[in-house]
Image (cartoon, rainbow, N blue to C red):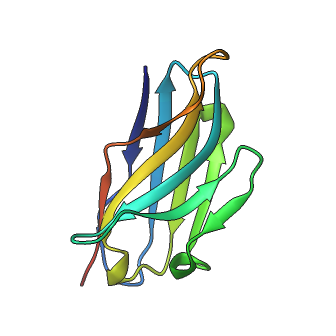
């Protein structure tokens, strides 16, 4: 069994910063890509940022230059540093990881429970 546990969501003023963390634990042989999605009320879930096992990075246009994704492979953890936050960044942020549980088990996607980020004055 694999679990993803997120932390770091909070209420912050516009222009502020937050750092989200997501740690994977359990039966893990190897982790492929890790990423962050978000879902605002009444909107579809969208990919915010993703980092491959080799370090290739993708950002959605709306966060380029403000958010930074990174990962610590020794800790099976992915981070999202969010700077210059805007009210439109308000959403529930979900961690996602594509994980091999064992060498014989095809990799599959796992999701965290979500952490609320609210940007408001």
Q: Which residue in the rendered view is the most extreme toward the front?
A: 106
* Residue 80, image x, y percentages: 52, 59
Q: Residue at x 45, y 55 (%)?
A: 20
Looking at the rendered image, the quarter that the N terminus falls into is top left
- Which of the pair 9/24 is nearer the observer? 24
Horizontally, is 105 left or right of 109 in the view?
right
Of residues 20 and 43, the one nearer the viewer is 43
Residue drawn at (65%, 65%) of the image: 58
In the rendered image, residue 94, in percent from the top left (x then y), is placed at 39, 52
Examine the rendered structure and indicate whether residue 21 appears above or below residue 119.
above
Q: Is residue 82 left or right of residue 114?
A: right
User: Which one is nearer the viewer's eye here, 74 or 61?
Assistant: 61
Total number of numbered discs in the rendering? 0
Q: Position of residue 102 (x, y in %)?
A: 61, 16
As drawn, 109 above or below 83: above
* Residue farthest toward the right in the current orientation of the protein: 54
Front-most of residues 66 and 61: 61
* Vertical side of 88 occupied by 113: above or below: above
Q: Where is residue 41, by image quadrant?
A: bottom left
Quadrant in which the C terminus appears? bottom left
- Residue drawn at (55%, 73%) of the image: 60
In the figure, is residue 95 to the left or right of 64? left
């Amino acid at each position: 069994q694999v679990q993803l546990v997120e932390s770091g969501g909070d209420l912050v003023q516009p222009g502020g910063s937050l750092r989200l963390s997501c740690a994977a634990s359990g039966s893990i042989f190897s982790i492929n890509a890790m990423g962050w999605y978000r879902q605002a009320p009444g909107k579809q879930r969208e990919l915010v940022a993703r980092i491959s096992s080799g370090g290739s990075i993708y950002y959605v246009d709306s966060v380029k230059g403000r958010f930074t994704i990174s990962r610590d492979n020794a800790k099976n953890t992915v981070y999202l540093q969010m700077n210059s936050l805007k009210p439109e960044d308000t959403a529930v942020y979900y961690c996602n990881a594509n994980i091999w549980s064992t060498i014989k088990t095809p990799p599959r996607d796992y999701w965290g429970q979500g952490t609320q980020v609210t940007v408001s004055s």
